[in-house]
Image (tube, rainbow, N blue to C red):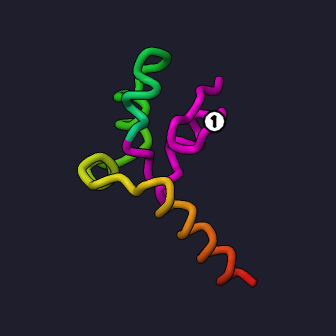
Amino acid sequence: MEIYCTQLGMLISLDYCLKVQMGLPCSHTYGCWKERVDVTAILKANFTDEEIALAFNTIPKSRLQKIMEAISEAGRKK
């Protein structure tokens, strides 16, 4: 199952949303998926309370910040 991600501008799966922030879920995961799956149960089954707090209690990165980090990461891998 896929949904349209307003942050990335493309279709993505729940698996991607659950690990997009360096192994932690996207801060928008709950809002995007709550009508389709039991997000709370999935999060509790896959993450500790601390990891959930870290993912959802921080200021999300902007699209530009994510792009710049991806470019930087790609440059380091060369």
Say which residue appears at 52% left-offset and 51% top-offset: 20
**Among all residues in the image, which is located at the extreme right?**
78
| Residue 65, x across and y down, in percent | 47, 63
Q: In screen coordinates, is 42 left or right of 17?
A: left
- Is residue 11 or residue 62 the one in the foreground? 62
Instruction: Specify the amino acid type for callout 1.
Output: Ile
* Quadrant placement of the C terminus: bottom right
Q: Residue 5: x percent and y percent?
A: 55, 35
Magenta stretch bounds: 1-27
To which quarter of the image does residue 72 belong?
bottom right
Q: How many marks?
A: 1
Q: Is residue 63 above or below residue 32?
A: below
Q: Residue furthest front?
A: 64
Q: In this rendering, does residue 20 appear at all?
A: yes
Residue toward you, 61 or 27: 61
Percent x, y for residue 8? 58, 44
Which residue is rendered at x = 40% and y = 21% of the image?
Answer: 34
Q: Quick check: 78 left or right of 7?
A: right
When the figure is inspected, residue 77 is found, relative to residue 16, above or below; the finding is below
Please state, as top left, top right, bottom left or bottom right, where the N terminus lies in the image. top right
Residue 16 counted in the magenta span:
yes
Where residue 18 appears, as percent x and y from the top left, is 50, 43
Depicted 71 relative to depicted 16: above or below: below
14 and 72: which one is in front?
72
Q: Mark 1 highlights which residue? A: 12
Q: Residue at (34%, 51%) from the top-left corner?
A: 55
